[in-house]
Image (cartoon, helix red, strand yellow):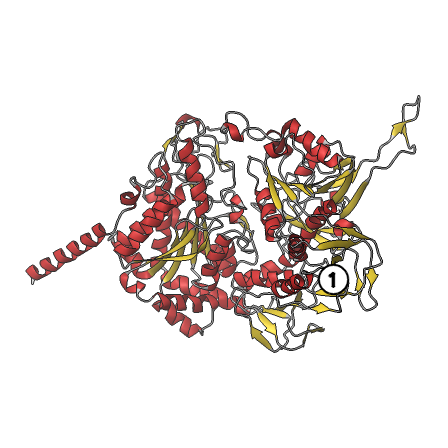
Amino acid sequence: MKIKLSILTAALVVTATTVFCQIPKPSETFGFEPGADYKMATYDQMLSYYEKLDAATDRVKVTEIGKSVRGRPIKLIFISSEENMKSLDKWKDISTKMARASVSDEEAKRLSKEGKAIIWFDGGMHASEKAHAQMTPELLYRIAAEESDEMKKIRDNVVTLIVPVINPDGLDIEGAWYRKNLGTIYETSGPPILYQEYVGHDNNRDWFMGNMPETKAAMKVLYNEWYPQIVHNHHQSAPAWARIFIPPFRSPVNMKIHPGVTTGVNLVGTAMANRFAMKKMPGAISMTTYEMWWNGGMRTAPYYHNQIGILTETAHTSPTPRFYPPDSIPKSIGGRFASDGISKSVDGTEIFYPYPWKGGESHFRDAVDYMLEASMAVLDLAAEKHDELLYNIYSMGKDAIEDKEGAFAYVIPTNQWDKTEAVNMVNVFMRGGIEVSEATSAFQAGGKEYAAGSYIMYGAQSFRPYLSDLMEKQNYPDLYQYPGGPPIAPYDLTGWTLPMSMGVNVDRIKQSFTAKTKKVNEEIKMPAGDLAGKASFGYALNGKENITATVINRLQKAGEKISIAQATFTDGKTNFDKGTFIIEKGDQTQKAISDLIKELGVSFTGLTTKPSVALKPMKKIKVGLYKSWDASIDEGWTRWVLEQFEFDLDTLHDVNIQGKDLSKYSAIIFPSQSPEDIINGHRPGTMPKPYVGGLGLQGLVAINNYVNNGGVLITFDQACDLAIDEFNLPVKNSVRGLSSSQFFIPGSIIRMKINANDPLAYGMKEEAAASYSRSQAFETIIPSRKEEGGNELIKLPVPRPNVTAVATYASSDLLMSGWALNPNRIKNKGAMMNVAHGNGNVILIGFRPQFRGQSRNTYKLIFNSIYLGATK
């Protein structure tokens, strides 16, 4: 018997060793170990490795979940034991039932014992943080190949989902830049373009809108297919001199988040901290910088789905080594001080920084090792508590369904100012896993009548926290550094209420009601519009909906003649608003209109005669968009919005402006960027020569000439100060120079009053919501002059500046959602100003009207400003 057991044991060892050897290591494909100094694997090398790994073992399955903006495949890789991999559909079904809390408590207890924990990891999101995309191939290899007791337990009890590179374009961009500049003084610089085509760093700010294809692909897996219990999002912005940030996070926590999520996050963070301590890996810090308030990040949106969202921020982003002199350790690490307050080294007395790093050499591989161990801490905990994780997500979902304090339902009526954006908002919620119903007949709720076709989102669903958080206003708490001191800045936004920012009418219904409905199973496409009346002369198109911009651009490209009505008018049956678009009928117009009605769901009214009011013909629209080599996220978002609505768009770098005739442009847009960055750009010695410098004096002169000769310059937020200062506009930025103790709105929704009779506000409601994030407010400077021979200023008749306030911040109730310190400082101040300058116009928009593709209720302020240039 002993001989037989020995033979069996030896056979098992040989089998395990054989499996381990057969599974390829990343280094065999890359030609170096992940994290090697001065080395970065390319995405093509990684794709090749994934294929080899998939072919080598039944423990791995490689799938594709979508394409990046530039068309690169986004891979999702499953890893578990061979037996578990045979039943992926079963584990997916159990995870779905538990996350949706769609079974009885007895069934949930049984399924929690039977099921497997579903755990998600991703790398490569912020591509300038180069190590996590290099780490994930090794994580894949270790889970698939290692035969330790710990890893066997993980494979038996966990189905691991890994998106190794969630931003493939960024890896291509950052890797190519690093290799090109390796060995030069620019080795550790970043590329002069965004590492995601449109949004750069904001690819981690898109996680409830899902505007970008990469985000959409991942959201489908997270909230509509697999519902992982833990979502671990790797990043690399560790506090200086720490090696890694791990949970717990600092306060505040959003009240909508289930406390089981918050404590679950803390539990994972504690497991990480303990693992680092026992592995003799110092420098793990917690409770600083990052919080659990904001929705919309890759690790924060899961909180509202009862998932444990984990962010780690690891040090050392570059393959280039660095030395930290041990005698230069600062006395504060991440805002935490050594106990004596004057010591130049942290002494280990901090609860959430108990094992300080002492400095010395730092290598790319160190970052890889810290990320691997953080991931292993997650997997080890999940293997140990797989049944608890499954039951807990069920229990939290059940609590949400049974919550009697929240809304019974949210109803989106058919009568909307902008029906297309109402549909877009419904799709945003569906992307996030919210269950939506459509009324099939009229019904009553909350004392109101609703028509068939209204959308209903019932509160009794497991993702109620997500639904209510996006539907309702945020009330961020007052937090100050000390009594009477400056505020503690939030990590990101304090308010993001979707109906406000998208301009959609939603009714919160507290009382129960009944309605005949059908479930909406896929994202909604706008139904076809209609054509009313006979079109002997042409067609009228109301400008209320954002989608009309796409209509106008397509019609212009087809050569149609379009004008804008400058007054209200009637055809005897229908009353038309100011700003109505008039399309004169030509040979091909009827077909073009018919196609737009079907494809975009817009409606037209036929006109038998030309309207009797003033019409402004539109010239061919062409937009110039300034793009600095000091890459601007706001430029990317602006470009994305304009492309979405199919504007004829040119990117204007400094050389495309300096000394050039810009008269072909209907409007030139300067997105939000500091005047310093626009004018001076990168300093010599910080970037290769083609990318050094900014707009400079020559560029400013060209822009000034453009406006003086009749052009329209549109500036957003920070860029407004450039126009005010350099063109000596008779406008003052009312909040410039105020300290955060005097005035502070770090990311909230602010109420505006709109002059809807102004051509720049055609199609707007009289009240709108501004996404105000450390933004601007304006007042007109009224000139005055001294009485001859006198010393005091007295009022004398002087020409009033030609400045029009298109939008002003409200006189009361400014804060719609979020938090603000002394918001009355901007009451009645200008939010959007039209300033005459020579024969042209400078449009100052003091906030970002396209903010992160969320603030759709203010898109028309951009479009109308462009139309101003096209109707001059």
**Dot 1 alpha-carbon crowd within 10 angstroms: few under 14, some 14 to 19, many 20 or more:** many
**Residue 819 locus on image (x, y percent):** 65, 49
Q: Where residue 389 sits in the image (x, y, percent)?
A: 41, 61
Decide if residue 659 is on the left or right side of residue 636: right
- Quarter where residue 450 is shown: bottom right
In this view, 613 is above or below 401: above
Residue, x 54% and y 46% (percent of image)? Answer: 199
Occupied quadrant, residue 347 = top left
Residue pictured at 49% horizontal, 48% vertical: 249
Q: Which of 837 and 273 is in front in this view?
A: 837
Q: Is 19 left or right of 313, judged from the image as shown?
A: left
| Residue 716 visible in this rendered orientation of the protein | no
Instruction: Give the structural element (helix, strand or loop) at label 1.
Output: strand
- Total numbered labels: 1
Q: What residue type is labelled 1?
A: Tyr
Rendering quarter of residue 675: top right
User: Which residue, given by chain and number where applicable, does mark 1 sit on?
Assistant: 539
Instruction: Quadrant for the N terminus, please.
Output: bottom left
Q: Quarter holding the C terminus?
A: top right
Figure check: 96 above or below 133: below
Q: In this view, does 837 lie above or below 865?
A: above
Q: Residue 93 or 303: which is nearer the viewer? A: 93
Q: Where is residue 659 in the image (x, y as percent from the top left)?
A: 65, 29
Q: Is residue 32 left or right of residue 126?
A: left
Q: Position of residue 571 (x, y in %)?
A: 82, 65
Q: Which residue lies furthest to the top in this view?
A: 789
Q: Is residue 443 visible?
A: yes
Q: Nearer the viewer, residue 63 or 738?
A: 63
